[in-house]
Image (spheres, rainbow, N blue to C red):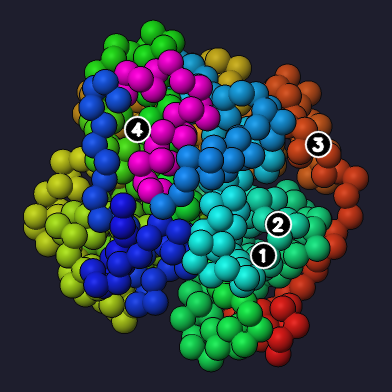
């Protein structure tokens, strides 16, 4: 299987090259030239496999330049019970809310308690093997812009991995105290963490700029290094996410929640559009998905896009209690547009250029038609998010985080509006303990909040009688290693300084 850039079809690479490089030289994203199609028998065969077995099958169909041994090694090292708490890293939980069934796909049992672990625990294994195939002897420099969860998950995935360096930038006021503490206490000899004076989009734009500045690339080359990306634009991030939708479908069948062949809906709390795109890709492979329900917080640029076909980032940026979705430029949407425009690099390039210059583009009527048919976009604000957390907790004793609550809220809106009762898989993307303050305020609105983040964790634990994930409980006694803050414009110098190659 070969991959090409969404902005230049003539840029054709192997999967190893796509993963090692992260982003195409023309600024486009790598996409498979075609998707494997699974037959009924293929899906049936997956029912009896465990998560690792399902993952190995999917990866072997996309990473055709990897040997079976290499893929086995990647999967067996990444999805261990030690790292994910059990043999199934992505278990289902079942609950009801006002009579509606919620099939909750819990994607946060990994080392950093957010769904990013599902991809970032395996990406370093994909990447080191890809580097060996394509750029043997070079060190990869991983630059990450994070709205909170990616940064920590990438740091955990890459810490002390040979031939890699990782530098993480986060918006100084745009992440939760727990997220900040998770990152600033990161261990590992090859890691650096820095806050920037700006929001997530500034961080992401800053990183993209560094990637595409030729002088910086030359500096790295002179020092036997090259940039790679652990952001959700990297194909090695997206691919692992396809697996858990397929696996969830198998689990629903095995648990007797649906019959084999039944359609499902998926509901995804969305920021950069990576997670929901993975479900779309699973559908292209034959997974019977009826609707993609795209849930946003007050930063509802995607809701408007799905409803009107106009993507317009010229709007107020809100800092919300679901910070991992505080995003106005959803990078992975580019891959969907490429697909929906009939694999047209020219059209994709035009829209992306318009986004760059005017902050806005409008898709064609034919693309609009597919989006309206397959996607539903909805949003809710912080108040509604907290009300949803409380209702779900009061009715079922099930505690969900703020991002998941946005998805649950939008799912309810969808059912109320359409009456569609197709069983829905709701992606649950973080442990509630990662956002203790907002969750605590939701379930116990009258309680007096304690001062520190860790006291809030304890209080939430007492009130909810749910377990605190071990990796979060263990952070309490760690001291910060990093406290750097830089201007957006100084990000390039920071990177060169961190690598010791100014
Ligand atoms: C990253 C993240 C999201 C958004 O996922 P995308 O793939 O960027 O759309 C949602 N919730 C949480 C908790 C996250 O960390």
Rendered image: mark on residue 161: 2
Q: Residue at x 46, y 81 (%)?
A: 212
Q: Main secondary structure of the magenta part?
A: helix
Residues rendered magenta in the picture:
43-64
Q: Decide if residue 170 is in sight here.
A: yes
**Cα–Cα span, label 4 and label 1:** 35 Å
- Per the image, the residue denoted by label 4 is 266
**Cα–Cα span, label 4 and label 3:** 31 Å
Could you say which is closer to the camera, residue 140 or residue 175?
Answer: 140
Q: If you read the primary sequence from the N terminus, does the residue marked by circle 2 or circle 4 appear first?
A: 2
- Per the image, the residue denoted by label 3 is 473
State whether residue 54 is above or below residue 67. Answer: above
* Tag 1–tag 2 contact (CB < 8 Å): yes
Q: Using a 10 Å C-alpha cutoff, classify the residue at mark 2 as few (fewer than 14 neighbours), some (14 to 19) or many (20 or more).
A: some
Q: Quadrant of the C terminus?
A: bottom right
Looking at the image, the residue that sits furthest to the top is 256
* Tag 2–tag 3 contact (CB < 8 Å): no
**Cα–Cα span, label 2 and label 4:** 34 Å
SS under mark 2:
loop
């Amino acid at each position: 299987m070969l991959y090409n850039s969404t902005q230049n079809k003539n840029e054709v690479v192997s999967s190893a090259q796509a993963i090692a490089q992260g982003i195409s030289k023309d600024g486009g994203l790598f996409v498979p030239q075609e998707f494997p199609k699974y037959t009924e028998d293929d899906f049936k065969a997956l029912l009896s496999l465990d998560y690792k077995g399902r993952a190995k099958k999917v990866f072997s169909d996309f990473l055709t330049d990897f040997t079976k041994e290499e893929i086995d090694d990647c999967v067996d090292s990444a999805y261990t019970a030690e790292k994910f708490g059990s043999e199934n890293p992505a278990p289902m939980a079942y609950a009801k809310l006002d009579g509606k069934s919620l099939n909750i796909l819990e994607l946060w049992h990994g080392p950093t308690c957010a769904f990013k672990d599902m991809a970032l625990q395996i990406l370093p294994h994909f990447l080191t093997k890809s580097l060996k195939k394509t750029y043997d002897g070079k060190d990869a420099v991983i630059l990450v812009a994070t709205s909170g969860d990616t940064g920590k998950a990438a740091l955990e995935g890459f810490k002390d991995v040979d031939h890699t360096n990782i530098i993480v930038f986060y918006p100084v006021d745009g992440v939760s105290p727990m997220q900040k503490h998770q990152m600033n206490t990161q261990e590992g000899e090859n890691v650096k963490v820095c806050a920037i004076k700006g929001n997530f989009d500034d961080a992401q734009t800053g990183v993209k700029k560094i990637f595409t500045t030729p002088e910086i690339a030359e500096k790295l080359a002179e020092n036997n290094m090259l940039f790679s990306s652990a952001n959700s634009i990297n194909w090695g991030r997206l691919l692992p996410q396809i697996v858990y939708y397929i696996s969830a479908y198998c689990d629903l069948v095995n648990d007797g929640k649906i019959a084999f062949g039944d359609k499902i809906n998926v509901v995804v709390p969305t920021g950069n559009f990576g997670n929901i795109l993975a479900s779309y890709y699973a559908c292209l492979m034959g997974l019977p998905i009826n609707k993609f329900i795209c849930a946003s917080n007050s930063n509802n640029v995607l809701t408007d896009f799905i409803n009107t076909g106009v993507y317009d980032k010229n709007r107020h940026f809100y800092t919300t209690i679901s910070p991992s979705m505080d995003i106005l430029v959803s990078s992975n949407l580019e891959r969907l547009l490429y697909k929906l425009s009939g694999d047209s690099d020219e059209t994709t390039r035009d829209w992306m250029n318009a986004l760059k210059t005017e902050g806005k583009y409008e898709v064609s009527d034919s693309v609009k038609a597919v989006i309206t048919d397959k996607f539903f976009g909805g949003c809710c604000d912080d108040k509604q998010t907290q009300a949803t957390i409380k209702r779900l907790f009061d009715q079922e004793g099930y505690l969900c985080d703020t991002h998941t609550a946005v998805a649950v809220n939008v799912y309810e809106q969808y059912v109320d509006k359409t009456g569609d009762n197709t069983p829905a898989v709701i992606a649950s993307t973080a442990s509630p303990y990662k956002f203790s303050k907002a969750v605590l305020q939701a379930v116990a609105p009258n309680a007096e909040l304690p001062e520190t983040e860790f006291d809030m964790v304890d209080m939430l634990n007492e009130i909810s009688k749910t377990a605190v994930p071990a990796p979060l409980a263990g952070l309490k006694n760690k001291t910060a290693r990093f406290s750097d803050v830089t201007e957006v414009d100084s990000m390039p110098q920071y990177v060169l300084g961190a690598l010791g190659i100014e």
